[in-house]
Image (cartoon, rainbow, N blue to C red):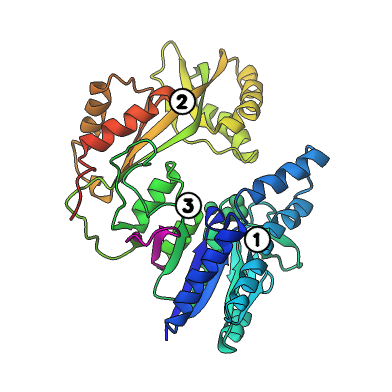
């Protein structure tokens, strides 16, 4: 008898009908004789609705209260699913994050899991129960309820899998695995058979939304293979793991894109030691994450500095940067919100010259102007106009032959 850890995302449990359909799936797995732990997200857009409720009361919800409020979304799903399973004559019990032993730090709204104490889950399994865990939530040492940041149920599932060691952590979602590119942009994108932890982490960090990047990071650290597949079909899905990859013919694994990109430019920054530190330290202190940074070659003792942040951080960034810019008498500070980035990702890019050139050729062939470029070990990223991101993604997908099946 094997132990299985399954996670069902928000759209998979978006209505009562879908919750009961998930109950059928879980029951079927149970009837094969396996022990099952299920992690669930809140139903559909429940979390957004709870956030919106809090905003109708105050523009600045207290983080502690907000986390307790948000944690209720997952409790609705876990309790309903347990009831639906009992209705099918399968003993089942729902557990909150607290009861499931998900311990976190006290960073409300984006808490990190510090430890998983799976005793209660194991007890319930030994009593013959299917265990349904409310995802996205945990408890601090002081018994405060926390949430793990948007999309955090994936992280709950991987953390439980790291503690319980099933053969793989099964993530059920609304798409049939990890695609070579977003199929909404690239019609001939295809689901990958497998992808490495490192590549998946890079894809997720560069904008692929299927898996939460923190969950992938955790899976990599604890070597928990993840199997991503659709709740609605019985497709093959994608395995994320650390072993050798089947599809080694193509050094490029996929194209990721992100449209939540804005560029802030500071003109005529004095070219002297310490300026970059002065510019970026206040942003780090404010928790604003800066992605791509480009500094022009200096002229007459000055240079222009450009960097990207998420659109939602632009106002705060401008405020901080303008303050610093005034103190060192820099020029104008401007922001451009109509940008996007597109990334070519693949472990095979390491030590393979020529891929950057092919990337730029493909974009120029499509008449797309590159606004910024950055490369990392296993990725090449170009910032382009947001209006060009769809075409850029398609051009790169075809330039690297990603539509070809591995059949
Ligand atoms: N319900 C939470 C969210 O919408 C967590 C999750 O779905 O993973 O972000
Ligand atoms: Mg999700």
Instruction: Tell me the mark number nearer the camera, choosing from 3 and 1.
Output: 1
Q: In x, y percent, where is residue 195?
A: 31, 56
Against 155, residue 118 (above or below) is below
Q: What residue is shown at x 45% (from left), y 17% (from top)?
A: 303
The residue at the far top in this view is 300
Does the image show residue 161? no
> Which badge, 3 or 2, is on the more N-terminal residue?
3
Element type where label 3 sits in the image: helix
State which quarter of the image contains the N terminus: bottom left
Against 30, residue 296 (above or below) is above
Determine which residue is flagged by label 1. Answer: 74
Q: In x, y percent, where is residue 42?
A: 62, 57
Determine which residue is flagged by label 2. Answer: 339
The residue at the far bottom in this view is 127
Whether the residues at callouts 3 and 1 have beta carbons within 8 Å, the answer is no
Asked if the beta carbon under badge 1 is closer than 8 A to the nearest atom of ligand 1, the reply is: yes
Against 238, residue 143 (above or below) is below
* Left or right position of 355 against 332: left
Q: In x, y percent, where is residue 94?
A: 65, 73
Element type where label 1 sits in the image: helix
What stretch of residues is rendered in magenta? 224-239
* Left or right position of 364 against 138: left
Q: What residue is shown at x 32% (from left), y 57% (from top)?
A: 196
Whether the residues at callouts 2 and 1 have beta carbons within 8 Å, the answer is no
Is 226 magenta? The answer is: yes
Determine which residue is flagged by label 3. Answer: 213
Element type where label 2 sits in the image: strand
């Amino acid at each position: 008898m094997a132990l299985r850890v399954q996670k069902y995302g928000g759209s998979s449990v978006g209505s009562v009908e879908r919750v009961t359909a998930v109950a059928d799936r879980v029951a079927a797995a149970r009837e094969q004789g396996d022990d099952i732990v299920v992690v669930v997200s809140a139903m559909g857009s429940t979390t957004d609705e709870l956030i919106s409720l809090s905003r109708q009361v105050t523009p600045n919800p207290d983080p502690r209260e907000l986390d307790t409020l948000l944690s209720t979304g997952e409790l609705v799903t876990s309790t309903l699913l347990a009831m639906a399973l009992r209705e099918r004559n399968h003993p089942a019990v729902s557990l909150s994050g607290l009861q499931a032993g998900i311990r976190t730090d006290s960073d409300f709204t984006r808490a990190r899991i510090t430890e998983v104490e799976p005793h209660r889950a194991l007890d319930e399994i030994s009593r013959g129960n299917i265990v349904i865990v409310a995802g996205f939530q945990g408890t601090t040492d002081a018994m405060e309820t926390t949430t793990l940041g948007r999309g955090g149920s994936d992280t709950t599932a991987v953390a439980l899998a790291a503690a319980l060691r099933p053969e793989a952590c099964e993530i059920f979602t609304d798409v049939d695995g990890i695609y070579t590119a977003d199929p909404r942009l690239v019609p001939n994108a295809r689901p990958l058979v497998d992808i490495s932890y490192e590549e998946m982490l890079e894809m997720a960090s560069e904008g692929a939304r299927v898996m939460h990047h923190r969950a992938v990071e955790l899976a990599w650290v604890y070597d928990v293979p993840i199997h991503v597949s659709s709740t609605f079909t019985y497709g093959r899905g994608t395995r994320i793991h650390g072993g050798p990859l089947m599809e080694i013919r193509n050094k490029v694994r996929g194209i990721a894109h992100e449209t939540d990109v804005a560029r802030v430019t500071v003109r005529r920054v004095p070219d002297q030691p310490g300026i970059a530190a002065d510019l970026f330290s206040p942003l780090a202190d404010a928790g604003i994450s800066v992605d791509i940074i480009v500094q022009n070659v200096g002229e007459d003792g000055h240079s222009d500095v450009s960097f990207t942040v998420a659109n939602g951080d632009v106002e705060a960034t401008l405020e901080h940067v303008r303050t610093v810019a005034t103190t060192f008498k820099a020029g104008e500070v401007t922001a451009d919100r109509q940008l996007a980035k597109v990334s070519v990702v693949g472990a095979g890019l390491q030590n393979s010259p020529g891929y950057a050139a092919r990337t730029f050729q493909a974009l120029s062939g499509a008449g797309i102007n590159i606004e910024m470029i950055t490369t990392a070990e296993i990725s090449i990223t170009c910032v382009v106009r947001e209006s060009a991101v769809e075409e850029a993604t398609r051009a790169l997908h075809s330039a690297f032959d990603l539509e070809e099946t591995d059949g």
